[in-house]
Image (cartoon, helix red, strand yellow):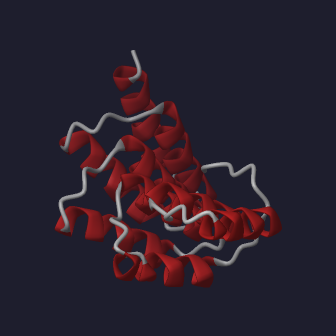
Amino acid sequence: TIQCPVSKGLFKVLLAHMTSQNIRSDAISFSAYFCTLEATSSWQSVSKLFAAMPASFIERNANTHTTCISAFEKCQQWAHAMSLLAEMKLKRIKENIITHTACISTFHKSEQWRNSVLLMKGMSSRTLGMSAISYNSCISACEKAAEWRVVLVLLGEMSQNMK
């Protein structure tokens, strides 16, 4: 999960200041706002703002996708997270381990252990690399579902791949 140090109120003040100084919003400022909305569990607002980016001539990138996925994680909106990951593939936005790990965390919080495992398998087949955080989130999702055989397989893979 991406942590955001800026509160929603402070961000609005900063955005108003940027506008008054003719400083154009960009993907970074949108991502920062997504963070503030994530903290308030306002995934609908994140979704609307993300959809509005192209109209503002702001290109969506891996960072904006990852920040949105992280916001969806907080509210267990795994289907929205998965659609953003699919959009990245469709629009040829370079996927990365951070985006995939955020999606796996969304599956974990939403008790979607099968999707978690499928995404982990996809990561290994695309050589995105896997982190201990990815494994931990996937293992936790399987543990919640009492899928102990899968947990053991993942632990074995983790000990081999994390050397």
Where is residue 125 drawn, in percent x and y?
19, 43
Q: Which residue shows up at 49% across the image and 72% down it?
A: 78
Q: Which residue shows up at 69% across the image and 52% down it?
A: 4
Where is residue 76 drawn, in percent x and y?
60, 72
Measured along the vertical axis of the image, is residue 33 above or below residue 57?
above
Where is residue 38 drawn, in percent x and y?
67, 66
Q: Is residue 106 visible?
A: no
Q: Nearer the viewer, residue 99 or 114?
A: 99
**Quadrant showing the C terminus:** top left
Q: Which residue shows up at 57% across the image and 76% down it?
A: 46
- Residue closest to the far top: 163
Where is residue 88 drawn, in percent x and y?
27, 63
Q: Is residue 140 visible?
A: yes
Measured along the vertical axis of the image, is residue 112 above or below residue 148?
below
Q: Nearer the viewer, residue 7 or 84?
A: 7
Could you tell whether 154 is left or right of 88 in the image? right
